Image (cartoon, rainbow, N blue to C red):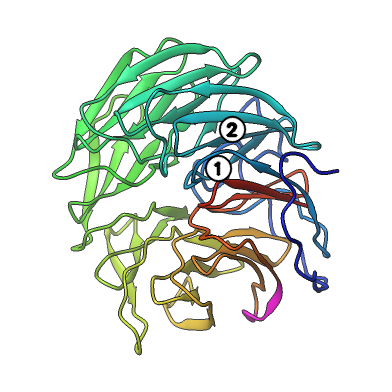
């Protein structure tokens, strides 16, 4: 069933059968099949708890009216997505029917919604964090920072963590928006914080990777990455992984508190804006060199690369042994996670800088020409 404006359908290719990965962790109070925030879970692993069908088809598309750089969240059968014109939309996952639209009065760029118990949260370019009621789309509260927000919120217990270009990471009370704490860095906080074991981790524009205690906002430790970083860190066990604008992907040892390995494409030096995913010992991410890269998580050695036709700022989602990722060449790709071979692609005709969300067996992604796509 189609909702909104139906777009062109390229030929669908058959996907291969593959092995299921371990499920992503979820927030208390959310269904295991949900994708309730950027990268799917607080550790930002990019791993889905459910698998889409092996053969995908476009179920519906919806014209939002402006560019979509924000990655969708999906919870309890509803898709939440931010639009460049400042609207936060709630759409029925099955039908594409618009449930409500909330206007921030500003612009929403990369900040992606995060769904809590009864509220969805998002940031805008005026530096305001908005809390919106899930049921009716009415404002619950708003908190103003002193800089634009491109970081995505992360809900941890009764806190909302989010970064601002005013150089701070904020912890806000999820119920009323009051400030619990904030910690200052030496530059803008662009990336989304990852959370694991009571610590929030931010890979900063100041070249420093910080671990911050969620309970009180005190800094536990820092590791010098030595490079401007816009990508959000992935936490896998006792390591953190992220790409930098110095053309490298780093693995950090959170116990020894140092750099374990540095990966570089030996043939092409471009920044990494895409945030990494972790599955079956592979770090997978996109690069501005037009490639999707798979790296051995233990050693930092290249396992495979897949070339697209333009830079890859979209962050991959992983489900059932498959990699789902967008490219600025306008295509959503599905790749075999083990080999990097292409299993399927869909041409939207516009840049895909947002990242796929996978929930309840559906794949959701928005394009820069303002169309939200749902595949299943």
Q: Quadrant of the N terminus?
A: top right
Q: Which residue is mark 2?
A: 27
Is 248 included in the stretch rendered in magenta?
no
Judge left or right: residue 214 versus residue 50. left
The quarter holding residue 224 reads bottom left
Q: For this rendering, which residue is in front, 362 or 90?
A: 90
Pick out the residue farthest to the left: 186
Is 340 included in the stretch rendered in magenta?
yes
Residue located at (49% from left, 13% from top): 139
Residue 121: x %, y % from top left: 48, 26
Residue located at (31% from left, 17% from top): 180
Residue located at (44% from left, 82% from top): 301
Relative height, residue 184 to residue 99 (above, below) = below
| Tag 2 and tag 1, C-beta contact below 8 Å | yes
Judge left or right: residue 321 versus residue 183. right
Relative height, residue 263 to residue 201 (above, below) = below
Determine crowd level at label 1: few under 14, some 14-19, many 20+ residues with C-alpha closer than 10 A: many
Mark 2 and mark 1 lie on one chain; the one further toward the N terminus is 2
Local SS, label 2: loop
For the record, the magenta segment spans 339-344
Relative height, residue 176 to residue 222 (above, below) = above
Pick out the residue farthest to the right: 1
Q: Which residue is mark 1?
A: 41
The quarter holding residue 147 reads top left
Judge left or right: residue 249 versus residue 324. left
Q: For this rendering, which residue is in front, 71 or 44?
A: 71
Q: For this rendering, which residue is in front, 50 or 79?
A: 79
Q: For this rendering, which residue is in front, 305 or 139?
A: 139
């Amino acid at each position: 069933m189609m909702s909104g404006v139906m777009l062109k359908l390229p030929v669908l290719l058959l996907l291969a059968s593959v092995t299921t990965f371990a499920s992503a962790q979820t927030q208390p109070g959310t269904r295991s099949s949900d994708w309730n925030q950027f990268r799917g879970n607080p550790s930002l692993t990019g791993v889905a708890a459910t698998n889409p069908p092996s053969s995908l088809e476009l179920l519906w598309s919806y014209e939002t009216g402006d560019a979509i750089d924000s990655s969708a969240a999906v919870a309890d059968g509803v898709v939440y997505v931010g639009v460049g014109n400042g609207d936060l939309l709630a759409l029925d996952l099955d039908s594409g029917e618009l449930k409500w639209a909330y206007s921030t009065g500003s612009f929403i760029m990369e900040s992606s919604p995060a769904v809590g118990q009864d509220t969805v949260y998002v940031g805008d370019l005026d530096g305001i964090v908005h809390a919106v009621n899930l049921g009716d789309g009415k404002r619950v509260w708003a908190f103003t920072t002193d800089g634009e927000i491109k970081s995505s919120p992360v809900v941890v217990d009764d806190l909302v963590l989010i970064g601002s270009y005013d150089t701070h990471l904020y912890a806000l009370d999820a119920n009323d928006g009051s400030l619990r704490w904030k910690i200052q860095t030496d530059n803008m906080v662009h990336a989304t914080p990852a959370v694991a074991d009571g610590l929030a981790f931010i890979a900063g524009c100041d070249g420093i990777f910080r671990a911050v205690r969620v309970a009180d906002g005190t800094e536990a430790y820092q590791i010098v990455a030595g490079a401007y970083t816009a990508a959000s860190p992935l936490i896998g066990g006792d390591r953190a992984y992220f790409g930098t604008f110095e053309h490298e992907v780093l693995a950090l040892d959170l116990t020894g508190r140092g750099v374990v390995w540095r990966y570089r494409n030996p043939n092409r030096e471009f920044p990494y804006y895409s945030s990494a995913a972790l599955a079956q010992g592979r770090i997978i991410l996109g690069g501005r060199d037009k490639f999707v890269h798979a790296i051995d998580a233990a050693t930092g050695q290249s396992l495979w690369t897949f070339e697209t036709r333009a830079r890859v700022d979209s962050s991959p989602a992983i489900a059932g042994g498959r990699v789902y990722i967008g490219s600025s060449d306008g295509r959503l790709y599905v790749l075999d996670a083990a080999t990097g071979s292409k299993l399927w692609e869909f041409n939207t005709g516009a840049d895909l800088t947002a990242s796929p969300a996978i929930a309840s067996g559906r794949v959701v992604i928005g394009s820069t020409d303002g169309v939200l796509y749902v595949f299943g």
